[in-house]
Amino acid sequence: GDSVTQMEGPVTLSEEAFLTINCTYTATGYPSLFWYVQYPGEGLQLLLKATKADDKGSNKGFEATYRKETTSFHLEKGSVQVSDSAVYFCALSKGGTSYGKLTFGQGTILTVHP
Amino acid sequence: DAGVIQSPRHEVTEMGQEVTLRCKPISGHNSLFWYRQTMMRGLELLIYFNNNVPIDDSGMPEDRFSAKMPNASFSTLKIQPSEPRDSAVYFCASSLSRDGRFGNGYTFGSGTRLTVV
């Protein structure tokens, strides 16, 4: 079945450091890919998305490129802030007969220190 | 749009009591999902509905859990009887089912934090 694997955390960085969180997937067909973010005490929020190969999703300084050849969707940010501390989830969806069901990775905890 | 609305935000109950969690999806969304989140297991999909019909309930832990969606604007997740191991944050999410292909994903509610003592 479909699956998503994220790099294990937690990840701890200093403010203004470069961030990479790795995500790879296994799926048949042509899934859409997503990154969600969960701040403490809140629900998950869509951070960015990509719907086809070579698409780049971006939002709030975060970027991820849909790489079909490596089945990856790594999240990057050039300069993190303390306010980026949260849990980040990679996910895929195929819609259609899956009714839009999302398959999530296990989440990566990011802590950014001043 | 008010987003996905869940109630209550917090629930503390005694073991053996019945608990009912409520969700109002975004108007026009035709798929609804219930998730449970714990430190040990992360996010677990419990059940999802399309056009008010349960599609997959294989994630429901046991017969103590039941979910209904009587109409397009309301869903409930019930636990009877509740146990301490049911303590978790329960999230509801909704989407347009075709959005998996068009890539809009879910909208999540703020969750219900359940504590069973």
Image (cartoon, coloured by chain):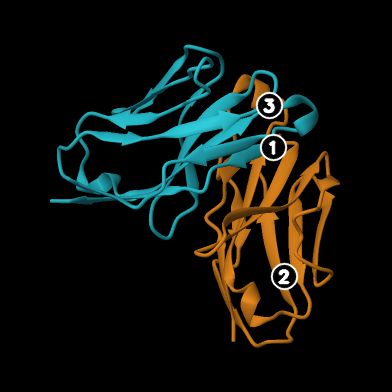
Q: Does B14 sit above or below residue B18?
A: below
Whole-number angstrom distance, CA of label 3 to CA of label 2? 31 Å
Helix, strand or loop status at disc 1: loop
**Residue B114 visible to the viewer:** yes
Q: Mark 1 is on which residue type?
A: Lys
Marks 3, 2 in one chain: no
Mark 3–mark 1 CB contact (< 8 Å)? yes
Residue A16 position within the rendered picture, expressed as x and y whole percent measured from the top left: 15, 37
**Rendered residue at 69%/37% (across/down):** A101
- Residue B73's disc is none
Helix, strand or loop status at disc 2: strand
**Splitting the image into 4 quarters, where does residue B78 fall?**
bottom right
Mark 3–mark 2 CB contact (< 8 Å)? no
- Residue A94's disc is 3
Horizontally, residue B9 falls left or right of residue B35, namely left
Residue B16 position within the rendered picture, expressed as x and y whole percent measured from the top left: 74, 86
Mark 1–mark 2 CB contact (< 8 Å)? no
Which residue is tagged 1? A101
Q: Quadrant of the N terminus of chain B?
A: top right
Letter of the chain shown orange in the rendering: B
Which residue is tagged 2? B20
Q: Mark 3 is on which residue type?
A: Lys
Horizontally, residue B1 falls left or right of residue A62, namely right
Q: Mark 2 is on which residue type?
A: Thr
Name chain A's colour: cyan
